[in-house]
Image: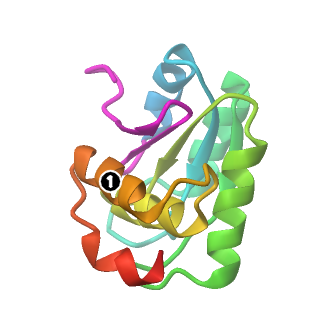
Amino acid sequence: MSDDLPARRLTDDLWVRGQLAPDEVSAARDAGFSTIICNRPDGETPGQPPADAIRAAAEAAGIDFIENPIEPGAPTPDAIDRQGAAIRAAAGKSLAYCGSGQRATVLWMLANPHELDAEERIARAEAAGYQLGALRPRL
């Protein structure tokens, strides 16, 4: 991605990253993202921007905003389904964020909206900097 908007590529249409700030949303638009997916619950860390602030910035920039927060290590079947549906429904590139990008990556791996085999998902996660081979039995 760019220095203005650091993000890690999982597929041509899905990138992940840590916490997004409202003032970074215009850089997301300029980078071609049409959808932002929030996987971080509000109040997880002190000073974290609330999802509503990012939603407002996204709406002002003409970007779709989807809130699908999950606690670390606890993706529910509903959250997995929502993530897959959001990625599949996006009109263009999606940017999913959480604390570090790892939860967003785990949700993508479990939802498998791109219908990739388990080894390909693990390899793409590793290429993005996330060591998630332990998920293999769930894929």
Q: Give the range drawn in magenta.
A: 1-20
Quadrant showing the N terminus: top left
Would you identify the image quadrant in which residue 59 lies? top right
Look at label 1 and name its amino acid: Ala
Q: In this view, does 31 lie to the left or right of 61?
A: left
Q: Position of residue 55 (x, y in %)?
A: 65, 45
Of residues 10 and 22, the one drawn nearer to the viewer in this rendering: 10
Of residues 37 and 123, the one drawn nearer to the viewer in this rendering: 123
Label 1: state its secondary structure.
helix
Residue at the location (43% across, 41% down)? Answer: 21
Q: Position of residue 63 (x, y in %)?
A: 69, 30
Can residue 105 be found in the magenta stretch?
Answer: no
Of residues 60 and 133, the one drawn nearer to the viewer in this rendering: 133
Residue receiving disc 1: 125
Residue at the location (39% across, 53% down)? Answer: 120
Can residue 5 be found in the magenta stretch?
Answer: yes
Would you identify the image quadrant in which residue 33 lies? top right
